[in-house]
């Protein structure tokens, strides 16, 4: 599956637009990680616990979007984007979305 943020794919021709595809996941913070992250917040630097959590959330959302596109018969997704939002205190949703297409 080709996934791009652009509206076109170099060297490919879009033959059919199948529609919007999306994937999402909601992740909650872990109390133990929050303690370590809080300490890192005091001394400065990257909070790797959250970096890893968000990276995994992006991968899960991306995979779910790809699975939906495959079920529609797509071989590519154009205009792919990621959005995150806080759902409740301590939990965030990661959404991947784009347009499923067939290319030649």
Image (cartoon, grey):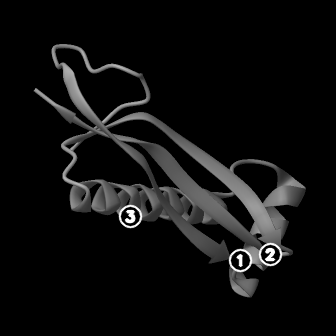
In the image: residue 52, left or right of residue 85: left
View extreme (bottom): residue: 31
Q: Earlier in the sequence, mark 2 or mark 1?
A: 1
Percent position of residue 74, x then y? 22, 46
Q: Secondary structure at mark 3?
A: helix
- Across and down, in percent, residue 91 comes to 74, 74
| Dot 3 or dot 1, earlier in sequence | 1
Residue ID for mark 1: 29
**Residue 90: mark:** 2
* Position of residue 102 measured from the top left corner of the image (x, y, whole percent): 20, 36
Q: Quadrant of the N terminus?
A: top left
Numbered badge on residue 64: 3
Q: Nearer the viewer, residue 68 or 89?
A: 68
- Residue at the extreme top of the image, as rendered: 11
Residue projecting furthest to the left: 104
Quadrant assignment for the C terminus: top left
Q: Which label belongs to residue 19? A: none
Mark nearer the viewer, 3 or 2: 3
Indicate left or right for 45 with 54 as reference: right
Q: CA distance from mark 3 to mark 2?
A: 23 Å
As rendered, which of 93 and 34 lies closer to the eye? 93
Describe residue 56's horizontal placement relative to residue 83 as left or right. left
Q: CA distance from mark 3 to mark 1?
A: 21 Å
Q: Residues within 10 Å of mark 2 (few under 14, many from 20)?
A: few
Pinpoint residue 37: horizontal percent, then vertical percent: 76, 67
Res. 93 image quadrant: bottom right
Q: Give the secondary structure at mark 2.
A: loop
Is 86 drawn above or below residue 21 in the view shown? below
The answer to whether the residues at label 2 and label 1 have Cβ atoms under 8 Å apart is: yes
């Amino acid at each position: 599956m080709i996934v791009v943020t652009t509206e076109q794919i170099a060297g490919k021709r879009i033959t059919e637009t199948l529609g919007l595809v999306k994937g999402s996941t909601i992740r909650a913070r872990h109390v133990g990680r929050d303690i370590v992250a809080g300490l890192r917040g005091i001394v400065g630097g990257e909070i790797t616990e959250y970096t890893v959590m968000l990276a995994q959330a992006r991968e899960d959302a991306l995979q779910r979007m790809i699975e939906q596109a495959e079920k529609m018969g797509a071989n590519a997704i154009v205009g792919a984007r990621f959005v995150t939002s806080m759902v409740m205190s301590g939990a965030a949703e990661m959404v991947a979305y784009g347009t499923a297409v067939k290319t030649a």
